Image (cartoon, grey):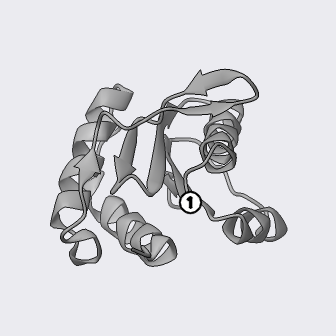
Amino acid sequence: MTIDAEGIAEDLAATLDMVLVYEPSTEKDLCNVVYACLSLLPSTAGYKISTEPDPVVYMGKSHKPDMSIHDQIAIELKVAKTRRAAVSAIKQAEIYRDGGYPAAFAIIYISTPYELDIEEEAKLRRKRVYPIIVGQPIF
């Protein structure tokens, strides 16, 4: 079964932008919001959403995603206070992708301005790693 990871990422990003009106205090709070959104999205209808996904082994170490969609998309969640934490979440999503998941999302809530450059985002998308950055202030 082929899952449209890019379509789900776009739907989820738009939904999270509307739903997240406060800063989640923990990744667990963010997980609850993301789980609810994924459960209601038409693009994920019929897919199993798991908060206990299978870990991957990458470079001899086990890495467990925070969530998964139908055991096909690994999800890393991060409530980031700094740009460094946001970058770390994206790197972790890349590890899930390299470790065997067909696609990975890095869902990052960050309250400070942070933007990926266009070339870096395109490179990640070619690798089927989709950063979803929400919570940034609007100027």
Can you tell which quarter of the image residue 93 is in? top right
Q: Residue furthest right?
A: 119
Horizontally, residue 119 falls left or right of residue 135, namely: right
Q: Around disc 1, counting alpha carbons within 10 Å, would you say few (fewer than 14), some (14 to 19), or many (20 or more)?
A: some
Location of residue 74 with respect to 30 vertically, above or below: below
Location of residue 26 with respect to 139 vertically, above or below: above
Q: Is residue 41 visible?
A: yes
* Percent of width and height locating residue 134: 47, 54
Q: Which residue is at a point 44% across and 76% down the rendered structure image?
A: 2
* Percent of width and height locating residue 4: 45, 77
* Percent of width and height locating residue 98: 69, 47
Query: Which quadrant does the C terminus fall into?
Result: bottom right
Q: Which residue is at a point 63% across and 65% down the rendered structure image?
A: 128
Residue denoted by label 1: 102
Q: Which residue is at a point 38% across and 48% down the rendered structure image?
A: 68
Location of residue 50 with respect to 82 vertically, above or below: below
Can you tell which quarter of the image residue 23 is in? top left
Can you tell which quarter of the image residue 3 is in? bottom left
Q: Amino acid at mark 1?
A: Pro
Horizontally, residue 60 falls left or right of residue 76, namely: right
Horizontally, residue 35 falls left or right of residue 53, namely: left
Location of residue 101 with respect to 15 vertically, above or below: above
Q: Nearer the viewer, residue 89 or 57?
A: 57
* Percent of width and height locating residue 118: 78, 70
Q: Which residue is at a point 59% across and 42% down the rendered structure image?
A: 112
Q: Nearer the viewer, residue 8 or 29?
A: 8
